[in-house]
């Protein structure tokens, strides 16, 4: 069995730049992981303690934070020249696994104990999301090595397994919540109302798991959207001193257990490993279908709230009949508008874009009215906040922000610098001998290959004054500039030999033109 070949090492005595060639999206991923991990320390871990009260939580959070440095230590060759990017990704996954295991342990404790001092706080949701983002492979680490293939397999199994496991836990949440409410002699109408809400979360998680099994990019996008909406609403809940939830604590024994599931599954769906396994879908089509599905979800939540409100009125919980009826009417209109927007987006978005935006904007206005009416009936919840504000805002973002949507259908123009360039997939590279101490004397070559004008390092790749270390770095991290490096008169022989063995026609032509 042949071993995985590696690109040539950087010239001796010249360290590679660990920050060169990293897409903006990967910096954003690192920053997001760091922020979530640190914020988790300010959140409740259980009913009777915060995250900082648990030394194991604090130590594992710090370990996950430190794992973020492995990305740059590996690129700087601190871990050794033989350690590839895909191997660094596996190491990061192993370093972040203990935090995820700790959360699983506390979930098991909550499942079997279920008293009022347990449960699991939103610290676990934010911490798990941060650990998953820290463990996820970066776009520049993709290759065809066995290590990366293993990473993709882990990501695929984690996505399906996590969504399926949380769907099962949500179903258990339904059973255990009904049992608990019956023990406290809640009215049957209230039990039915709560059951509808829990079933909504259970079905959502089950459908996402099914989408992962089918390798659906739309399901992956919806999972990310659901996680982002839930996370944003949870942070708002934190700023209001947990007015939307039970003190930032959820339990399998209490309705409704969904913050940790949706945030964790959304973070997994963001992984490059899950993306690599998903079926290729036209980006604009994917965003339109995801937005359409999100609108249908908003309509489903509104219908569930209508049934829940009717059942609460039947249970005679002291709700105002007039306000309750008004709230039901607003929700009914909201459900019709969002469903109509979802249908128009799914069937003819290109021709009905204005109507889709109008329906989404109207849904946001109706959501504000619904929030005011609901707050006059009883306390707002995370689910009602998601319905009233999260869904329409998410749809606007999906239809207006992505580059593919703006290029296909038009929309708000964003600065070019705000859009991260897509990272290319590097090919399998044959082994080359170590680089020389210094680049050889430059020979006078024919006219160099024209560099891709869009890349910021094009001129550097073509410049004969560029150092051997920089040329090595560009050739091994920026595939689209390899032909330019091959034509550069300062490129040293070992690097040329390696480039010539890649089998790229453009690179071979550039080498042949050197004479």
Image (cartoon, helix red, strand yellow):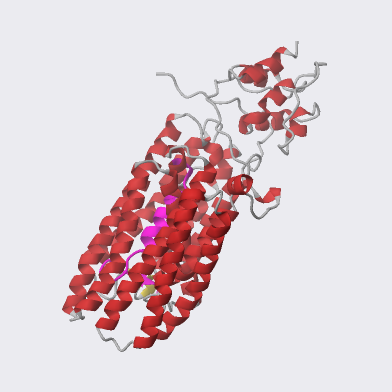
Give the x, y percent position of residue 52. 44, 69
* Residue 64 is one of the magenta-drawn residues: no
Give the x, y percent position of residue 197. 31, 68
Left or right of 183? Residue 307 is right
Q: Can residue 427 be seen in this view?
A: yes
Give the x, y percent position of residue 202. 30, 59
Foreground residue, 220 or 351? 351
Foreground residue, 85 or 343? 343
Q: Is residue 267 visible?
A: no
In this rendering, the answer to whether 52 lies above or below 220 is below
* Residue 270 is one of the magenta-drawn residues: yes
Q: Quadrant of the N terminus?
A: top left
Q: Quadrant of the C terminus?
A: top right
Q: Residue at x 45, y 76 (%)?
A: 370
- In the image, farthest residue toward the top: 515
Q: Which residue is drawn at 40% across and 69% down?
A: 383
Boundaries of the magenta span: 247-273
In this rendering, the answer to whether 43 lies above or below 19 is below
- In the image, farthest residue toward the front: 351
Q: Which residue is drawn at 35% across and 68% down?
A: 303
Foreground residue, 432 or 353? 353
Left or right of 279? Residue 486 is right
Give the x, y percent position of residue 377. 39, 84
Q: In which quarter of the image is residue 357?
A: bottom right
In this rendering, the answer to whether 405 lies above or below 203 is above
């Amino acid at each position: 069995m042949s071993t995985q070949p590696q690109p040539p090492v950087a010239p001796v005595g010249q360290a590679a730049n660990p920050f060169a060639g990293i897409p903006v999206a990967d910096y954003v991923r690192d920053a997001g992981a760091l922020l979530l991990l640190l914020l988790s320390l300010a959140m409740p871990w259980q009913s009777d303690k915060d995250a900082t009260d648990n030394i194991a939580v604090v130590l594992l959070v710090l370990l996950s934070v430190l794992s973020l440095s492995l990305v740059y230590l590996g690129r700087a060759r601190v871990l050794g020249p033989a350690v590839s990017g895909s191997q660094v990704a596996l190491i990061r996954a192993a370093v972040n696994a203990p935090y995820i295991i700790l959360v699983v342990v506390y979930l098991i404790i909550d499942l079997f104990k279920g008293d009022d001092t347990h449960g699991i706080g939103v610290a676990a949701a934010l911490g798990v999301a941060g650990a998953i983002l820290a463990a996820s492979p970066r776009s520049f680490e993709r290759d065809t090595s066995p290590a990366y293939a293993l990473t993709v397999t882990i990501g695929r199994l984690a996505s399906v397994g996590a969504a399926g496991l949380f769907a099962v836990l949500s179903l258990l949440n339904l059973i255990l919540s009904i049992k608990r409410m019956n023990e406290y002699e809640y009215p049957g109408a209230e039990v039915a109302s709560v059951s509808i809400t829990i079933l909504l979360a259970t079905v959502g998680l089950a459908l996402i798991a099914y989408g992962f099994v089918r390798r659906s990019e739309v399901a992956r996008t919806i999972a990310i959207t659901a996680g982002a909406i839930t996370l944003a609403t949870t942070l708002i809940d934190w700023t209001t001193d947990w007015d939307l939830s039970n003190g930032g604590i959820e339990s399998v024994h209490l309705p409704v257990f969904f913050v940790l599931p949706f945030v964790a599954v959304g973070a997994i769906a963001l992984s490059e490993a899950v993306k690599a396994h998903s079926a290729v879908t036209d980006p604009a089509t994917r965003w339109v279908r995801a937005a359409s599905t999100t609108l249908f979800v908003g309509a489903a939540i509104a219908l569930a709230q209508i049934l829940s409100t009717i059942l609460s009125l039947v249970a005679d919980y002291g709700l105002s009949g007039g306000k309750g009826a008004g709230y039901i009417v607003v929700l009914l209109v909201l459900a019709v508008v969002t469903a109509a927007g979802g249908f128009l987006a799914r069937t003819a978005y290109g021709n009905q874009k204005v109507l889709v935006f109008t329906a989404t904007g109207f849904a946001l206005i109706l959501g504000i009215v619904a929030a005011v009416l609901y707050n006059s009936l009883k306390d707002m919840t995370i689910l009602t906040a998601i319905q009233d504000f999260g869904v329409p805002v998410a749809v606007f973002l999906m239809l207006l922000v992505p580059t593919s949507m703006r290029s296909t259908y038009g929309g708000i123009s964003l600065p070019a610098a705000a859009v991260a360039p897509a990272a290319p997939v590097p090919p399998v590279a044959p082994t080359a001998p170590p680089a020389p101490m210094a680049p050889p004397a430059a020979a006078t070559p024919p006219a160099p290959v024209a560099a891709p004008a869009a890349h910021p390092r094009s001129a550097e790749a073509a410049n004969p004054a560029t150092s051997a270390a920089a040329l090595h770095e560009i050739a091994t991290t920026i595939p689209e500039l390899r032909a330019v490096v091959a034509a550069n008169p300062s490129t040293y022989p070992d690097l040329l030999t390696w480039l010539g063995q890649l089998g790229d026609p453009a690179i071979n032509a550039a080498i042949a033109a050197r004479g």
